[in-house]
Every structure is written in C-alpha cells, then in structure tokens.
Amino acid sequence: MNANDNVLELIYNSIDEINQELPGDLQLQKTPDTILYGQSGKLDSLGLVNLIVAIEQNIEETYGKTIVLADEKAMSQERSPFRTIGSFGDYVALLLEEPDD
C-alpha cells in the first residue's frame, strides 16, 4: 500500500464518521471521483468543515502529525483541493510529505 492509498483509507474512515450524521441522500460515496464541494457536491460549507476536522484529527492519531488543511495555501489554489475525494487525497499526501517545522 503506497502513501496515497493510506491517505485515501484515512479519508474514507473520516467519511464514515461524517456519513453517520448525514441523511441517506447526502451521504458521500467512497470513490476518488466523488465531488465533495461546489457545484454537484453533496457537502455544504459546514459539512466540508466537519470533514476537514475529522481528517485532521485522524491524521494526528495515525501519523502523530498536526496539519492544517484549510489554510491560505489551500484556498488560493486555482483548482480547489476540496473538489473531489481524489484531489483532497492528493493534497493531504502532499502536506504529509512536507518536513515538520
């Protein structure tokens, strides 16, 4: 299993947590192509924040590393890393590879 697979697994576990709070028609499918936010996305801004917090907590528990996913770096990108599960996973993997300060 490579690093991106591990990150996707972590995101899927976080989605399981979030899906428990969502009605059936708004639950997220666990595929890299699932649109999270924006046009055709199933999450509103609060739902996205809840998912981000769940992922940050799971990263800290799994990797012992604290990262901030919703920062200026993420918000200033031309293509939002929060658009799909796959793009979010790529972004998280990139942040995990950065050296600790």
Image (cartoon, grey):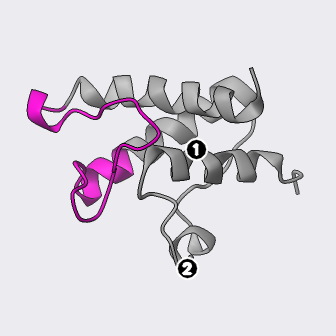
Residue 65 position within the rendered picture, expressed as x and y whole percent measured from the top left = 74, 38
Q: Which residue is mark 2?
A: 76
Residue depicted at x 89% and y 52%: 99
State the quadrant of the N terminus.
top right
* Residue 40: percent from left, percent from top: 21, 57
At label 2, which amino acid type do we have? Ser
Q: Earlier in the sequence, mark 1 or mark 2?
A: 2
Label 2 element class:
loop
Question: Is residue 40 magenta-colored?
Answer: yes
| 30 in relation to 53, above or below | above
* Neighbourhood count class around disc 1 (C-alpha, 10 Å): few under 14, some 14–19, many 20 upward: many
- Residue 80 pos. (x, y %): 48, 67
Q: Evaluate whether residue 64 shows in this view.
A: no
Specify start and end residues of the magenta stretch as a single range.
22-50
The label number, if any, that marks residue 1 in the structure image:
none
Say above or below: 85 vs 74.
above
In this rendering, the answer to whether 82 lies above or below 92 is: below
Q: Is residue 77 left or right of residue 35?
A: right
Q: Nearer the viewer, residue 91 or 101?
A: 91
* Left or right of residue 93, residue 51 in this image: left
Say few, some or many: other residues with alpha carbon within 10 Å of mark 2 (under 14 / 14 to 19 / 20 or more).
few
Q: Residue at left 28%, top 35%?
A: 28
x 58%, y 75%: residue: 72
**What SS does tag 1 mark?**
helix
Give coordinates of residue 21: x percent, y percent. 20, 29
User: Hey, which quadrant is residue 29 in on the image?
Assistant: top left
Whether residue 99 is visible: yes
| Residue to which mark 1 is pinned | 89
Q: Is residue 101 above or below residue 18?
A: below
Distance, label 1 to label 2, CA atoms, is 17 Å
